[in-house]
Amino acid sequence: MECSPVIIRAARAADALAVEALVEREVHRGTVLPRRFSADAFLVAELDGQVAGTVALTAWSDRVIELGTLIADRSGLGIGRALAEAATRQARERGHDAIVALTSVSGFFERLGFSAVAQTPWAEARRVSTLPTPWLPELGPAVAHKAASSCATCPRLAGCSQALMALRIGQGAEARACA
């Protein structure tokens, strides 16, 4: 496997403007929700000295963490995959049992080993009955927290249909690294 020229690293305060520009662009496209920059929550992809992508990690509980605001400025370079894999490694290092993503591109996450979950925070916020996830019991309380803390007040709640994808960390696809 050939190594990519993309470098994934923790965000720094100096990345704020670049990350906010990426997020703002995608908010206008309707692919992500608004999110305030906090260097300790974001990873960035750097290409040729410029921020070319970002991802944020947000704990839903002490066991479940969300991979969100995944943005790749250029397609076909593996930026999104590299960011998702780095976020998964970081979540594992932090001791979380599962990593989740709310997404409209579930196939991308399936290729990384994630599985679709019937239970979604937007459905819970709308009070729509969903099925529990027996293979990931810690997800129930985390979904309830996400529904109450974010989804219930989201302006896009009525039309939300994002899939909830989950990966039990340590199972499924392992992160790949260049040799």
Image (cartoon, rainbow, N blue to C red):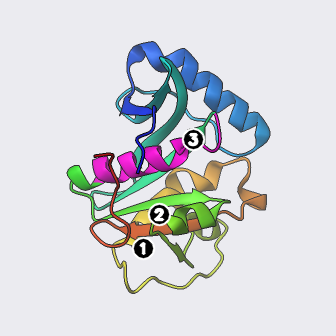
Which numbered marker is on residue 77? 3
Relative to 48, does residue 106 appear above or below in the rendering?
A: below
Q: How far apart are marks 2 and 3 (CA)?
A: 16 Å
Magenta region, residue range: 74-91
At numbered mark 2, what does the secondary structure look like: helix, strand or loop? loop
Q: Residues within 10 Å of mark 1 (few under 14, many from 20)?
A: some
Q: Do the residues labelled 2 and 3 touch (CB within 8 Å)?
A: no
Relative to 41, does residue 154 appear above or below in the rendering?
A: below
Outermost residue on the front side: it is 2
Say whether residue 95 is left or right of residue 171.
left
Marks 2 and 3: which is nearer the front? 3
What amino acid is labelled 2 in the image? Answer: Leu
| Residue in view at x 77 percent, y 60 percent | 158
Relative to 70, does residue 73 appear above or below in the rendering?
A: above
Residue located beneath label 2 in the image: 112
The foreground one among 60 and 52 is 52
What amino acid is labelled 3 in the image? Answer: Leu
Residue located beneath label 1 in the image: 140
Say whether residue 174 is left or right of residue 128.
left
Give percent across and percent down for residue 175: 34, 56
Say whether residue 150 is left or right of residue 62.
right
Give percent across and percent down for residue 96: 27, 58
What amino acid is labelled 1 in the image? Answer: Gly
Q: How far apart are marks 1 and 3 (CA)?
A: 35 Å
Give the mark nearer the N terminus: 2 vs 3.
Answer: 3
At numbered mark 1, what does the secondary structure look like: helix, strand or loop? helix
Give the mark nearer the N terminus: 1 vs 2.
Answer: 2
